[in-house]
Image: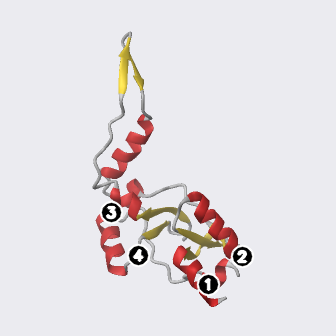
Amino acid sequence: MLAKEIMTVDVVTVTPEETVEDVINLMVEKKISGIPVVNEEKKVVGIVTEGDLLVRSQKLHIPSYIQILGGIIYLDDPEEFREELRKAVAIKVEDIMTKNVLTVEEDVSVEEIATIMSEAGINRLPVLRDGKLAGIVSRADIIRSMARK
């Protein structure tokens, strides 16, 4: 079985310019946990998930550091803090979305999709046709395909 046979084709999407509040309301209204972010050409430029939104409600972890001879040595990765802070104060989708999105082509097998999801710890994969969003496959889609076998 292939991605094109199990994917949801009526995909809810947002653009980078939309607000985070719009995305939250859309996710609640549509009862979905992730939304692909597309540009004008329908190319996937990001994805917003519940995990991205949770950053807005969690306590920020300020990186630990020590000062030696007038210099600062970080004990934690300051880049992780910058990313958390960026998402915590985000107004626009482009500021909160995950930018490095894993995607698959529509002719990829369900087994390969399940492997990618499991190894990457993700719940959904946008499906592309000619570089543009054609659908999305979630873990629930894979489970439904197993029930049909």
Q: Which residue is mark 1?
A: 145
Q: Is residue 71 left or right of residue 38?
A: left
Which numbered dot is residue 107?
2
Query: Cα distance, mark 1 to mark 3?
Result: 33 Å
Q: Of label 1 and label 4, which has the lower sequence position?
A: 4
Q: Using the image, determine if residue 47 lies above or below residue 139.
A: above
- Within 10 Å of disc 2 (Cα), the crowding (few <14, some 14-19, many 20+) is some
Direction from residue 44 to residue 2 in the image, left or right = right
Disc 4 residue crowd, few under 14, some 14–19, many 20+, Cα 10 Å: few
Q: Select label 1 or label 3 by which is in front.
A: 1
**Local SS, label 4:** loop
Amino acid type of disc 3?
A: Val
Residue 20, numbered label? 3
Q: Earlier in the sequence, mark 1 or mark 2?
A: 2
Circles 1 and 3: CB atoms closer than 8 Å:
no
Q: Nearer the viewer, mark 1 or mark 4?
A: 1
Q: For the point 33% across and 41% down, which residue is it?
A: 61
Q: Position of residue 114 (x, y in %)?
A: 63, 69
**Residue 104, above or below 52:** below
Secondary element at image label 3: helix
What is the distance, in whole Å, between disc 4 and disc 2 at their CAs? 24 Å
Query: Image quadrant for the N terminus?
Result: bottom right
Q: Where residue 129 sits: x, y (%)? A: 65, 74
Give the crowd class for mark 1: few <14, some 14-19, many >=20 residues within 10 Å.
some
Q: Earlier in the sequence, mark 4 or mark 2?
A: 4
Kind of residue at badge 2: Asp
Residue wearing tag 4: 32
Q: Amino acid at mark 4?
A: Ile
Q: Quadrant of residue 12?
A: bottom left
Q: Is residue 131 visible?
A: no
- Sequence-first tag of 1 and 3: 3
